[in-house]
Amino acid sequence: MAVKPEVLKGMDIFEFLKRDELRDIAELTEVEEYEQGDLIFKEGDEAEKIYMVLEGRVSIELEAGAGKRISVYTLTKGRFFGYPALLRTRRYTTYARCLDKVKVATIVADELVNKIFKKDCRRGYLVIKKVAEIIANELSDTRVQLLFLAQL
């Protein structure tokens, strides 16, 4: 089931695009549901999809050794995650764990790139620019979290 363009407009990764620019992107979406405690992906998994939170909370976590993970930030409705799917590395670098029952919209990254970005470079540029901004903010949040943990 695809989500409507209006729903994508509320996602941080696409918030700057016009509704008519979201129609063909919306056609690529699928909705997935997870239970509390489920892992959406884990560090090292092949990164094929990007995710957008529709309902619930997702904890983005780093491996802390000895099977322990620490949460570096929590995502709620409207937030995008899974950016390695859009990069050459193509491996997730974190864990994404559901804190509640979660509903996400997903897009297979190769479809987004090949069906949308390669045909409309402007849109591709704008989305990747937004992804870079999101990554920069998340790195800053992670740094603050690590500094806090270092003081414990």
Image: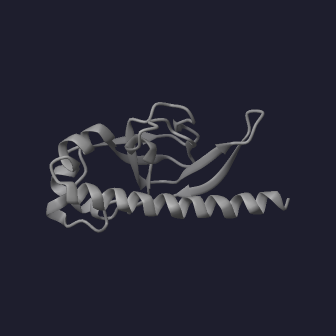
What residue do we see at 19% from left, 48% from top?
A: 116
x and y percentages locating residue 39 in the rendered image: 54, 37
Q: Tell me which corner region of the image, top left, top right, bottom left or bottom right, holds residue 150.
A: bottom right
**Outermost right residue:** 152
What residue do we see at 26% from left, 44% from top?
A: 113
What residue do we see at 46% from left, 31% from top?
A: 46
x and y percentages locating residue 33 in the rendered image: 41, 41
Q: Name above or below for residue 115 compared with residue 72.
A: above
Between 137 and 36, the residue placed more toward the observer is 137
| Residue 102 in view in this figure | yes
Q: Tell me which corner region of the image, top left, top right, bottom left or bottom right, holds residue 19.
A: bottom left
| Residue 82 in view in this figure | no
Image quarter (top left, top right, bottom left or bottom right) of the N terminus: top left
Q: Tell me which corner region of the image, top left, top right, bottom left or bottom right, holds residue 144.
A: bottom right
Image quarter (top left, top right, bottom left or bottom right) of the C terminus: bottom right
Please indicate whether residue 79 sits to the left or right of residue 114 in the image: right
Q: Name above or below for residue 98 compared with residue 131.
A: above
Between 54 and 60, the residue placed more toward the observer is 60
